[in-house]
Image (spheres, rainbow, N blue to C red):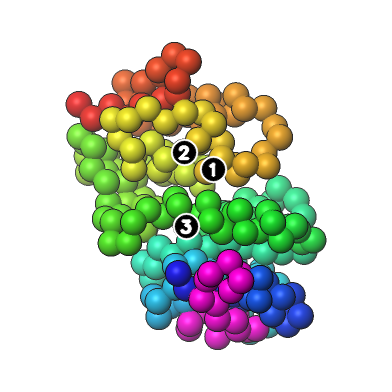
């Protein structure tokens, strides 16, 4: 698999590239936001590791521009900034995950592999239709019939985990790992909060609770 690192701290970028190549990935590195946008827009990468504070064009703009152009490549954002607002802004521009510097290399590799697993097999359709529900995972848009339903980044991420496995039971642990990552130490009942919100927005009968097992997106 091919990875693109967009990071202006050259020592860090080369260190990450060396480590990821040792993991078996093919890795390219650029140090400027505009170069990163151009390379990522070629559509030849399986994942982009994107710093936020970049010369030329910051990571938020790079990510938003890629998503607006229809590119669904997984994006892991890196930043030295810390705080909920920054994470929310990164995810709302279309990033799939967020890692604050300084970080453990082991954690970064785990996040990369988790994002690649979430993407699923190459060539999989980004549009999932379940009854009146249509979820476009590339454009990150949700429709009920002809009407679009606006979801937050986290709401969409939870729904995505259910819709790509529609009809199957998805455990709370799976949702936590893929949406909040394996290192999440908050209240696991946060999943129930988001499922409740999705039911309110999309219909109470769409997501069924399977007691002791998880949740299932109904296909009938």
Is 195 situated above or below 183? above
Q: Which percent across, then down, holds residue 195?
A: 47, 28
Residue 205 in picture, x, y percent from top left: 31, 21
Q: Residue furthest top?
A: 211
State the residue lying farthest toward the right. 102
Please provide percent x and percent y for residue 35. Answer: 55, 85
Of callouts 1 and 2, the N-terminal one: 2
Q: Is residue 54 above or below residue 130?
A: below
Residue in the image at 79% along x and 61% along y: 102
Give the quadrant of the C terminus. top left
Q: Residue at x 62, y 41 (%)?
A: 182
Mark 1 and mark 2 residues within 8 Å of each other at the beta carbon: yes
Q: Is residue 67 visible?
A: no
Q: Nearer the viewer, mark 3 or mark 1?
A: 3
Can residue 191 be seen from the camera position used here? yes
Residue placed under numbered mark 1 in the picture: 179
- How many numbered circles does the render carry? 3
What whole-number distance in Å separates the C-alpha atoms at marks 3 and 1? 13 Å
Nearer mark to the viewer, of 3 and 2: 3
Taking the image as shown, residue 29 lies to the left or right of residue 149, namely: right
Vertical position of residue 76 compared to residue 133: above or below: below
Q: Which residues lie in the magenta part?
A: 20-39
For label 3, count other residues whose C-alpha is less than 10 Å away and answer few (under 14), some (14-19) or many (20+).
Answer: some
Please state, as top left, top right, bottom left or bottom right, where the N terminus lies in the image: bottom left
Is-magenta flag for residue 31?
Answer: yes
What residue sits right under mark 2 in the picture?
A: 158
The CA distance from mark 3 to mark 2 is: 17 Å
Residue closer to the observer: 18 or 142? 18
| Gap in angstroms between the C-alphas marked 1 and 2 | 7 Å
As helix, strand or loop, the secondary structure at mark 1 comes to: helix
Residue hosting label 3: 116
Query: Counting other residues with Cα less than 10 Å from the Cα at mark 1, is it few (<14), some (14-19), or many (20 or more)?
Result: many
């Amino acid at each position: 698999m091919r990875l693109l690192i967009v990071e202006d701290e050259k020592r860090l970028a080369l260190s990450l590239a060396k480590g990821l190549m040792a993991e078996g990935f093919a890795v390219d590195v650029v140090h400027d936001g505009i170069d990163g946008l151009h390379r990522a827009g070629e559509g030849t990468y399986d994942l982009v590791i994107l710093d936020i504070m970049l010369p030329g064009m910051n990571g938020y703009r790079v990510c938003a521009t890629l998503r607006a152009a229809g590119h669904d490549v997984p994006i892991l954002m890196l930043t030295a900034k810390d705080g909920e607002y920054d994470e929310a802004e990164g995810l709302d521009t279309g990033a799939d995950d967020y890692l604050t510097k300084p970080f453990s290399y082991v954690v970064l590799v785990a996040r990369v592999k988790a994002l690649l697993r979430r993407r699923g097999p190459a060539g999989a359709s980004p549009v999932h239709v379940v009854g009146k529900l249509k979820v476009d995972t590339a454009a990150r848009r949700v429709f009920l019939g002809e009407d679009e339903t606006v979801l937050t980044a986290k709401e969409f991420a939870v729904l995505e985990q259910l819709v790509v496995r529609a009809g199957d039971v998805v455990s709370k642990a799976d949702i936590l790992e893929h949406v909040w990552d394996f290192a999440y130490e908050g209240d696991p009942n946060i999943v129930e909060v988001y499922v409740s919100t999705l039911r309110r927005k999309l219909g109470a009968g769409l997501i069924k609770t399977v007691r002791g097992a998880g949740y299932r997106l109904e296909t009938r």
